[in-house]
Image: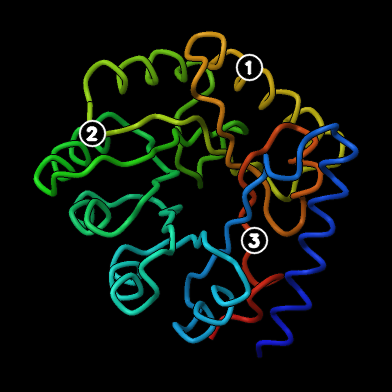
Amino acid sequence: MHEDINNRLATIESKIKEACIKASRLNQSVELIAVSKLQSVETIKEAHKLGVKNFGENYAQELGKKNLACPKDIIWHFIGPIQSNKIALIAKHANWVHSIDRVKVARKLNEALKAEERKMHVLIQVNVDREESKSGIFPEDVISFAQDIRADYPNLILEGLMFMPNINASKKDKLNTMENIQSIQNALINELPDCGHLSLGTSGDFEESIAAGSTMVRIGEMLLGKRS
């Protein structure tokens, strides 16, 4: 297992480096997040030994169990839809949340973090393709929502945006979506210059996402292997 993850990691890191060179960006400007949902603790520990420090989880209870069982220097990213009754778990165990998508979630997470005496890095999830099956606010609401988070929820450290584009779109539509994402991100940075993080890109499109400005790519089975 160790050798398999090592080989896959080397391939992914090489592709990230090449994509950064093409985009005239520093290699260090892109963080690899290993999506570890439904992966074993042993697999996470193997990847961690190889230098992977950022792991993404979709389910709050799974995140909590893994956080207690894994090395303490792991940075945990919650990247799934947020259920109100799981917010306390997320506040306790995550370091980052990528999927803030409504005021109710922001308010409850802020309250839970206050009770934990913690602050947390957060990203706003944007439904750029307006898909009914996906969470996220619409592009026209990004600026006002970001301003509300900054003004009203001091335990949330707003860092930027997260996108999950339609993976089944045509190549032309995907290019248009990437352009829209860049435009939305630039508008936010113009308003809030320190919100420069962009969580964008998975196994199938992380190189194009880096070209579009992604600072965090979320890669699962391509790195860690088939889920159990």
Q: Position of residue 56 (x, y in %)?
A: 49, 60
Q: Earlier in the sequence, mark 1 or mark 2?
A: 2
Residue at the spot x=53%, y=38% of the render?
A: 162
Tag 1–tag 2 contact (CB < 8 Å): no
Q: How many numbered marks have been drawn onto this rendered protein structure?
A: 3
**Is 2 drawn above or below residue 121 in the view shown?**
below
Of helix, strand and loop, which one carries label 3? strand
Which residue bears the numbered disc 3? Answer: 219
Q: Nearer the viewer, mark 1 or mark 2?
A: 2
Q: Nearer the viewer, mark 3 or mark 2?
A: 2
Q: Position of residue 161 (x, y in %)?
A: 52, 32
Which residue bears the numbered disc 1? Answer: 186
Q: Amino acid at mark 2?
A: Asn
Q: Amino acid at mark 1?
A: Asn
Q: Residues within 10 Å of mark 2 (few under 14, many from 20)?
A: many
Q: Position of residue 189 (x, y in %)?
A: 56, 16
Residue at the spot x=52%, y=59% of the render?
A: 54
As drawn, the label of residue 155 is: 2
Cα separation between marks 1 and 2: 24 Å
Task: Give the image quarter of residue 135.
Answer: top left
Q: Residues within 10 Å of mark 1 (few under 14, many from 20)?
A: some
Q: Earlier in the sequence, mark 3 or mark 2?
A: 2
